[in-house]
Amino acid sequence: MKFTYCTLSIVSALGTSLLADTIVLDLTSSVSSQQVLSGEPTVTWRYNASLTQGPSSTLSVIPNSFLGPIISVNTGDHVQIHQQNNLMGETTTHFHGLDIPEISDGHPKDAFGPGETYDYEFIVRNRAGTYWYHPHPDMMTGQQVYMGLKSFFIVSDPAEQALDLPRGEFDLPLCLHDADFTADNQLVYSGANMMGHFGNTQLVNGQPNYNYSAATKIYRLRLLNGSQSRILKLGFDDGTPIIVLGVDGGLLDAPEEYPYLLMGPGERYELWADFTDKNVGDVVTLKTLAYDEFAGGIGQGNEIDLMTFSIDRAEEETLILPTSLVPMGEVYDVADIQSEKYWPITFEGGMFLLNGEMWDMSDMTGTVENERATADTLELITMTNHEGNIQFAHPMHFHGRQFQIHSRSMVDPDSEDSYNTIKHGLVDSGWHDTFMIMPNETVQFLVRWSRHTGLFMWHCHNLPHEDMGMMRNFSLSEAPCPADLTHDGMVDISDFLEIIANWGSPFGDVTGDDMTDVADILATIADWGICNSGFRELPIPSKPTSAKPNSITPKKPNGRK
Ligand code: C2O
Ligand code: CU
């Protein structure tokens, strides 16, 4: 660390008082049971939580559901979660989409066993949005999520609160997932495999035949595709277009309209669902529509009813669709990238590989630094999905940071017809932490890596693929110029102003110590001028070039298999 003078700790301590709410939760993961179908109750695994400190609105239980409680916080909140593992095996908890320190990211290396506890602690740096939490232990993520360990983690902020959007009961989180049951109502899971898991029973928030009694009002639907493998092509049976308000990392600049919505496992979308022109007695069905089989997996692309909205009462509505929502903030320019990487998806030896390799246990702990990047730098990542003779669609997820999709291209003319059955539902605007890459497609995205250094993961969010080893570590080393808040290549008065403008918010935290305080001003002073040379000396490719193998990845002798 550059900032070693002893005043820092004192100043940091003072700064604590500037923080927003401190939220302290006890979270348990336990074997439980729930009446899901008629007859025998179903054994599930579930999160329960209790609030030790913080606003009572922090926790809300989803009625009649085996999913965990919804955790709702504000940007800037300081969150402490003490988790107790009452399961039979190891677990961790990952806060999907949040930019948090390595130690609280739920990496499999931090798994803890039955009867043990783990403390997660972080500042909420993300903008308002629909995030979620779920386990992440090595090879067991799919089963633990499937058995019920998952729920929403909803973040709000002043910009989101200022909008006239549906609130309260009209703000509706819906987790869409599927399951298989035995004759005596117990969950069956097929585990890690390349074909994925497709349940024969569609669930919404853990309940089958889900019907929501709705008013003639406008709803904000916060959708999470919590399936293991099923890629949804969402549409309403009456052909109403899909109006998207938000994506993984929060609200868009402005609402966007789509004929349908393609949604891979792990992705979230917020919709504006307008039932004001319905009559009492009408029933609207939300479906996944048919699409071509090319995405891989038996049953992928089948048309299925997901849930119904039964309009059972007439109520006045005053909301109108806002013409603008929340500006996304910094829009990355490919001309500003500091380096770029090429990370292909391939298929070899019955496995889907990332960057030519599978999950690396060569050190027995799963902590080998596979891919590497520098904290707080802007990179262009090119992912391809067209080599070899087997391609599936994969929902790719990167931990820690929301990114911007830069481009998509279909490289195989023979796949065009199939691609046309889904492509109008791909939403690439806004901030994403998970995106679909289809067979024979190349997707490029721009990411400014987190300022949190350490070991994080990237993986396929088709959970049977992830557990099969379609997961890698990436390691973030310290940024060359952490005080350059404005990313203009130098530490100067603009960074000072930025800290002051963001005083008390996580965005003014130069030191990355999860506090915005005088230490950040001191760090800026300490760094003043230091980065004026050097920061721009990272390799800057002239323009996005044609992809070539990533030389940054060190090859490990153990290799694949
Ligand atoms: Cu939602 Cu690494 O996971
Ligand atoms: Cu996959």
Image (spheres, rainbow, N blue to C red):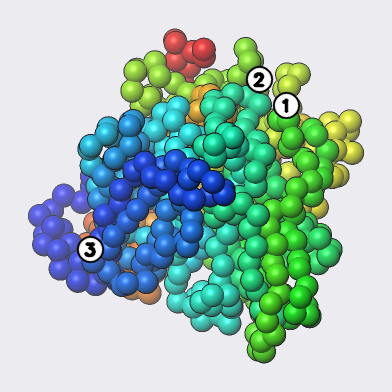
Judge from the rendering whether residue 11 lies leftward or rightward of residue 139; answer left or right: left
Mark 3 vs mark 1: which is more N-terminal? 3
Q: Which of 177 and 485 is in front in this view?
A: 177
Badge 2 marks a residue whose secondary structure is strand
Disc 2 vs disc 1: Cβ atoms closer than 8 Å?
A: yes
Q: In the rendered view, would you say 187 is above or below 99?
A: above
For disc 3, the marked residue is: 52
Q: Identify whether 219 is placed above or below 196.
A: below
Q: Please identify the quadrant where the N terminus is shown.
A: top left
Q: Name the residue under label 2.
A: 347
CA gap, disc 2 and disc 1: 7 Å
The type of residue carrying mark 1 is Gln
Q: Point out residue 140 in the picture as x, y percentages from the top left corner.
A: 44, 30
- The residue that disc 1 covers is 391
Alpha carbons under labels 3 and 1: distance apart: 48 Å
Residue 404 is at least partly visible in this image: no
SS of the residue under disc 1: loop
Provide the secondary structure element on which disc 3 rests. strand
The residue at 89%/39% (across/down) is 417
Residue for point 48% across, 59% down = 64
Mark positioned earlier in the residue sequence (2 or 1): 2
